[in-house]
Image (cartoon, grey):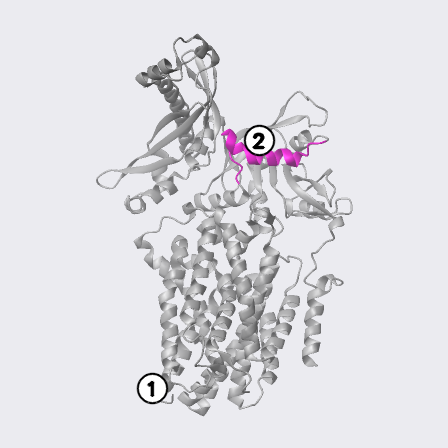
């Protein structure tokens, strides 16, 4: 990697935070309510220990690895050249497919919310085209973009939630008793699953300057992400109730459709969605960048940008072919993709790192 | 070069407005080509439904009305909104939907589903059922030369809770209640003929007409004014109202302010739900008095408070009785009791649906007359009484 493409740990953390906002807002609160019911507004808080534990585990496993090594390098060291490369290639393949899922998912959300007369190909192609540009560029450029956009995103989320607050009713949220602990934990699974996607960003570790400002700031950002998840679930369930929320694809968007900002401006959803597209774009770009980074390591090539194109092509194919319609796509977004994601982030990647650690390769 | 080409492609897809199928701006319109709809009416018709839209065009203030009948709301609304005199009607700022009683009794669910599913509509649109007539006739009757029907409906929407005669629930609140309780309340209105005191107003006046209780598919019962008042009190939706209270030979008009109900379950030792106890504390102020009564007298005030309590109690009891009669817990007593005692309700052994129809409910109301504003005694009483202000004050203190 070029010496110029370095970023601080804080920048990587912000990139992760902005990226993960995209799936977090997309799946919540429906995914949590489906598993946790009325008590699921507490699930984001319940997900915190598990998310923190996974992050701490990964930090512990990679603590002594030399600077400049990404997860793909560590897998090759830990598993040997052949198996390590095969594992890394498998991750890259999955991430390309996952990128396609993200592009299709963003397109479907745009159609069902503000562009009912549009078509998915336009959004998929546009998103991929813009993401290729970003993914082919420097890692620090994408991270810096996330850094610049983050305050705007936080401001929008704050204004949206503050404007939605008057409609929140305690009747829709209570009662919750200690007997609901199982439901709360079930509801935490999809939320934890989203936070676990931060594991993929270990593939970019090679670009990170480990010493410097922002070290160990990952936990506050994780906390902030889960706080937003908590607020989104709380406000949506408090406004629509459990049973109505569960019937909707984008329940949080329904809340936004009704808000009046400061009692004056209404129908702001198009602006809000436009801001959210930014998180979709950042996440998709990051995923393509990670996939290309893996291929670069696996092949030993000097430049990453060459691999962005085939990865994006695979993502595009996946986005078009994954499902014929929105109903078939739901099956992917509700079950298949989360399951595969969890397998990679909680099982395969930590195992790969643990093996290298056990063999004292780093 | 590659980057420039990609950027050009992205921008061309994102920004062009020339090719409807290949742009994200396919549903954008020019301001002068749109009609801003504020009120929608839906009635039954021979074809299926009769849909009307009422609003203003562009920057003009003049009210516009269009209507069309068709087999379903989706088809009719689409034809109506896309072709009103060459302009496109925008439903995104619709404030209220008025549904004719006939349609409400058969296919209210279709209206609600349309609002929920169609992204241009917002869920906070108020829903009203028009009693004893069609929504179309009501809106046409309300519209005057300088009084748009939409203004009249919006005015009622804002003020009805302060009349104690109902509450305009939004489609969101109705949908949430249907999803949660299997039933919901919808405000009813009717047109009343009144003498046209000035030319520029409409022929009809808009009046609250109780509430409708709806199942997921249609309205199945209607509450009268007394039951509606009780329902508002028990749901905590009550804001204020003025009531006439007889006291001796006089009639007090009191304004009753916000009342918060306290509803709790009573269980037997073995965990059975014995009854629900409802307690309300009402605070009222004397607005005016017809006849002579000494408000300084504690006895007189006590009489007024008891009369007020009786009025409010009877309204609450009437509302409580209607639930089991309709077989619908539209007051959400089950939800309220569960929030008060979640574990005991869960452990009572019988599902709420079984318990609800025969559950005894007691209502206690405590009323307090708080103040009489600036005038304590009517002029007649003040004029007839003898003694100095100091003597009056000491008499009053002795009295209380």
**Residue A325 in view of the camera:** no
Q: Which residue occupies the extreme right position in the image?
A: B86
Q: Position of residue A86 (x, y in %)?
A: 47, 86
Q: Nearer the viewer, residue A45 or B369?
A: B369
- Does the magenta run of residues contain B155? yes
Q: Position of residue B361 (x, y in %)?
A: 34, 32
User: Residue sitting at 46 percent across and 36 percent down?
Assistant: B237
For label 2, the crowd category at 10 Å Cα-Cα, with few meaning under 14, some 14 to 19 and many 20 or more, is many
| Residue A336, placed above or below residue B138 | below
Tell me the quarter of the picture where residue B294 sits. top left
Callout 1: chain: A
Callout 2: chain: B
Tell me the mark number nearer the camera, choosing from 2 and 1.
1
User: Residue sitting at 42 percent across and 13 percent down?
Assistant: B293
What residue is disc 1 on? A358
| Residue B46, placed above or below residue A283 | above
In the rendered structure, find residue B189 and report the number of the disc placed on it: 2
Q: Nearer the viewer, residue B211 or B16?
A: B16
Q: Nearer the viewer, residue A277 or B359?
A: A277
Give the extent of the magenta segment.
B146-169
| Residue A206, placed above or below residue A20 | below
Total numbered labels = 2
Q: In the image, B219: left or right of A178?
A: right
| Residue B178, placed above or below residue A272 | above
Q: Position of residue B20 (x, y in %)?
A: 73, 61
Q: Nearer the viewer, residue B115 or B298?
A: B298
Tell me the quarter of the picture where residue B190 sits. top right
**Magenta-drawn stretch, dominant element (helix, strand or loop):** helix
């Amino acid at each position: 990697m070029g010496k110029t493409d370095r970023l601080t740990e804080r920048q990587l953390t912000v990139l992760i935070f902005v990226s993960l906002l995209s799936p977090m807002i997309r799946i919540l609160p429906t995914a949590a309510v489906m598993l946790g019911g009325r008590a699921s507004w507490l699930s984001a808080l319940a997900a915190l220990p598990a998310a923190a534990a996974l992050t701490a585990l990964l930090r512990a496993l990679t603590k002594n690895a030399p600077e400049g090594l990404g997860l793909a390098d560590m897998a090759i060291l830990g598993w040997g050249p052949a198996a390590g490369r095969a594992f890394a290639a498998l991750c890259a393949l999955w991430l390309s497919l996952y990128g396609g899922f993200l592009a299709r998912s963003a397109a479907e959300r745009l159609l069902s919310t503000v562009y009912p007369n549009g078509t998915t190909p336009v959004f998929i192609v546009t998103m991929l085209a813009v993401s290729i540009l970003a993914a082919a560029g420097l890692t620090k450029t994408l991270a810096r973009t996330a850094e610049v956009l983050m305050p705007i995103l936080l401001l929008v989320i704050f204004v949206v939630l503050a404007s939605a607050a008057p409609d929140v009713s305690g009747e829709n949220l209570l009662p919750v008793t200690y007997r609901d602990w199982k439901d709360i934990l079930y509801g935490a699974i999809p939320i934890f699953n989203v936070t676990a996607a931060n594991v993929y960003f270990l593939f970019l570790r090679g670009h990170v300057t480990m010493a410097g400002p922002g070290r160990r700031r990952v936990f506050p950002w994780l906390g902030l992400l889960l706080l937003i998840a908590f607020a989104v679930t709380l406000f949506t369930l408090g406004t629509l109730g459990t049973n109505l929320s569960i019937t909707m694809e984008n329940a949080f968007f329904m809340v936004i459709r009704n808000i009046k900002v400061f009692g004056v401006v209404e129908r702001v959803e198009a602006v809000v969605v436009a801001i959210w597209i930014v998180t979709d774009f950042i996440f998709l770009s990051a995923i393509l960048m990670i996939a290309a980074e893996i291929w670069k390591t696996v092949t030993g090539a000097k430049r990453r940008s060459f691999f962005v194109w085939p990865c994006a092509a695979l993502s595009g194919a996946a986005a078009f072919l994954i499902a014929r319609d929105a109903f078939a796509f739901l099956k992917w977004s509700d079950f298949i993709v989360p399951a595969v994601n969890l397998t990679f982030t909680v099982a395969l990647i930590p195992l790969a790192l643990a093996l290298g650690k056990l063999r004292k390769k780093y | 070069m590659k980057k420039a080409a990609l950027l050009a492609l992205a921008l061309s897809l994102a920004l062009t407005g020339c090719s409807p199928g290949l742009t994200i701006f396919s549903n954008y319109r020019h301001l002068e080509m749109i009609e801003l709809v504020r009120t929608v009416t839906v009635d039954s018709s021979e074809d299926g439904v009769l849909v009307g839209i009422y609003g203003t065009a562009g920057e003009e203030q003049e009210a516009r009305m269009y209507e069309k009948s068709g087999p379903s709301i989706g088809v009719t609304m689409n034809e109506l909104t896309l072709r009103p005199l060459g302009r496109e009607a925008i439903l995104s700022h619709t404030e209220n939907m008025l549904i004719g009683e006939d349609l409400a009794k058969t296919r209210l669910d279709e209206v609600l589903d349309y609002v929920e599913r169609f992204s241009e509509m917002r869920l906070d649109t108020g829903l009203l059922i028009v009693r004893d007539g069609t929504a179309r006739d009501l809106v046409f009757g309300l519209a005057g030369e300088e009084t748009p029907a939409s203004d009249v409906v919006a005015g009622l929407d804002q003020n009805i809770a302060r009349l104690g005669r109902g509450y305009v629930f939004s489609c969101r609140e109705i949908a949430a209640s249907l999803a949660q309780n299997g039933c919901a309340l919808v405000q009813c209105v009717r047109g009343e003929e009144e003498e046209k005191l000035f030319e520029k107003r409409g022929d009809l006046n808009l009046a609250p007409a109780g509430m409708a209780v709806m199942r997921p598919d249609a309205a199945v019962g209607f509450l009268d004014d007394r039951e509606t008042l009780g329902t508002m009190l028990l749901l905590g939706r009550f804001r204020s109202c003025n009531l006439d209270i007889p006291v001796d030979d006089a009639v007090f008009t009191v304004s009753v302010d916000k009342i918060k109900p306290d509803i709790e379950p009573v269980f037997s030792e073995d965990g059975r739900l014995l009854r629900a106890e409802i307690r309300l504390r009402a605070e009222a102020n004397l607005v005016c008095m017809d006849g002579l009564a000494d408000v300084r007298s504690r006895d007189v005030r006590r009489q007024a408070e008891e009369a007020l309590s009786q009025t409010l109690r009877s309204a609450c009891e009437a509302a409580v009785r209607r639930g089991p009669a309709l077989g619908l817990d539209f007051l959400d007593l089950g939800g309220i009791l569960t929030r008060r005692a979640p574990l005991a309700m869960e452990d009572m052994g019988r599902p709420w649906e079984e318990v609800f129809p025969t559950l005894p409910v007691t209502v206690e109301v405590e009323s307090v007359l708080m103040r009489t504003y600036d005038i304590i005694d009517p002029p007649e009483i003040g004029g007839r009484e003898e003694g100095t202000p100091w003597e009056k004050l000491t008499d009053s203190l002795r009295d209380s």
